[in-house]
Amino acid sequence: MGAAVDEPTSFAFLDGFADADLNPNPDMPISQNTFTFTEHDGGARAVYVSTFASADGRHQVLDMGVVEGSTSASDQIDDLIAS
């Protein structure tokens, strides 16, 4: 699927790993990611889905702390939108 934008309801992108020179690291997994936004109780609900080609790839990034990193990034969205 790659990158796509369906403003204002969703956007999608590939996420992977790179070295210090931003060269993709082929030894690390790549995930297809989609953010979807819907109205909910007078506000907005954001749903984030990350799909990996294999369970091994998913486990690899889970072991590296992807949940904590994604949560930290998501927790900054309200401040970003307000600025």
Image: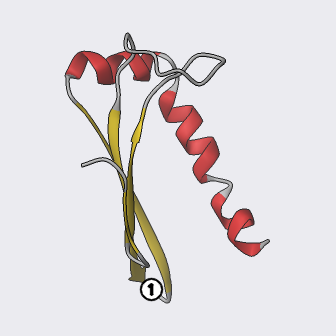
Residue 28: percent from the left, percent from the top?
39, 16
What residue do we see at 35% from left, 21% from top? 29
Relative to residue 77, is residue 14 depicted above or below? Answer: above
Is any atom of residue 36 visible in this view?
A: no
Binning the other alpha carbons within 10 Å of mark 1 as few (below 14), some (14 to 19) or many (20 upward) gives: few
Q: Is residue 32 left or right of residue 54?
A: right
* Image coordinates for residue 16, horizontal then vertical, percent: 44, 29
Does 75 sit above or below residue 36?
above
Amino acid type of the residue that numbered disc 1 sits on in the rendered structure: Asp
Q: Residue placed at 49% from the left, 23% from the top?
A: 17
| Colour mode of the rendering | secondary structure
Q: Quadrant of the C terminus?
A: bottom right
Percent from the top left, x then y, of residue 71? Answer: 56, 43
Task: Looking at this view, name the residue that lies furthest to the top.
Answer: 27
Residue lying farthest to the left in this orientation: 54
Asked which quadrant contains residue 53, the reply is top left
Give whichever of 9, 55 is nearer the camera: 9
Determine whether, in the image, residue 82 is placed left or right of residue 74: right
Q: Nearer the viewer, residue 80 or 15?
A: 15
Left or right of 17, for residue 72: right
Query: Going by the picture, which residue comes out furthest to the right?
Result: 83
Can see residue 9?
yes
Which residue position holds label 1?
41
